[in-house]
Image (cartoon, rainbow, N blue to C red):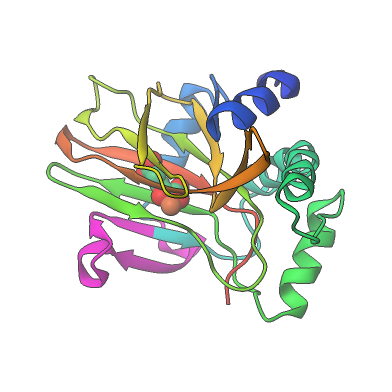
Amino acid sequence: MNVAIDWDRIGADLDAHGCAVVAGLLDAQQCRAYAGAYDDEARYRSRVVMERHGFGRGEYRYFGYPLPGHLAALREGLYGPLARIANRWHGAMGIATRFPARHDEFLARCHAAGQERPTPLILRYGEGDYNCLHQDLYGEHVFPLQVAVLLSQPRDDFTGGEFVLTEQRPRMQSRAEVVGLGRGDAVIFTVNQRPVNGTRGAYRVTMRHGVSRVRSGQRHTLGIIFHDAE
Ligand SMILES: O=C(O)CCC(=O)C(=O)O
Ligand SMILES: [Fe+2]
């Protein structure tokens, strides 16, 4: 990782909003390398054309194992501090599951339950493409936080295509949040549910994420999901 990450600030932002931004997680060269390798089929286990599944418009590819070294290190490195936040959230939500300190230990749990396929992915959107609000759940084992890194430069490479989160609160109307990102910036966000402090203790809200319509150009993202898929 290129930047020193202020995990206290990230934890506070996640608690308050269900998302947090890490500016400059990747540098321009790393962004170009990931985006430029989109068509290098040997790196991936599968390709998904979103329109065919009603997921939106655009496409993505899941990396195969072994992951590229940089990506494996990034996934592992981000996991540890996020697991501490995830465990705190589970405590607050009254969910018994706790996450081990190391990612390989958590992956062993996923793999033993039949969730063996890697979930990191690269997404590619062109003009008119978008990603419907969704949750990346791939089986029983769910790590409650995930990361997306914008690989393209807003304005220069594309317009539109904003990262969007919605938060559904019990018996209340939903709230939307647009996350402003520059190239190389990462958003860390809630996969499914997060705790919110109310007057009578914590309650759970449900979050979804997506991408608004790309108005022009091409937009690439790197998605890092910590649980593997069935
Ligand atoms: O393209 C994006 O910004 C969102 C990608 C996404 O859905 C994900 O990384 O899970
Ligand atoms: Fe997603």
Q: Does residue 141 belong to the magenta stretch?
A: no
Q: Is residue 219 left or right of residue 83?
A: left
* Extreme residue in the front direction: 200
Residue 226 position, x and y percent, is 65, 54
**Residue located 81% across and 55% down the image:** 99
What span is colored magenta in the figure?
40-60
Residue 167 position, x and y percent, is 43, 42
Residue 9 position, x and y percent, is 68, 18
Q: Does residue 45 belong to the magenta stretch?
A: yes
Name the image quarter holding residue 166.
top left
Q: Is residue 38 left or right of residue 2?
A: left
Query: Relative to residue 201, is residue 67 depicted above or below?
Result: below
**Residue located 72% across and 79% down the image:** 113
Name the image quarter holding residue 6.
top right
Q: Nearer the viewer, residue 68 or 17?
A: 17
Quadrant location of the C terminus in the rendered image: bottom right
Kindly tell me whether residue 58 is visible in this rendering: yes
**Residue located 29% across and 37% down the image:** 219
Query: Relative to residue 99, is residue 53 depicted above or below?
Result: below
Query: Relative to residue 182, is residue 112 depicted above or below?
Result: below
Q: Nearer the viewer, residue 61 or 92?
A: 92
Query: Relative to residue 112, is residue 157 depicted above or below?
Result: above
Quadrant location of the N terminus in the rendered image: top right
Kindly tell me whether residue 1 is visible in this rendering: no
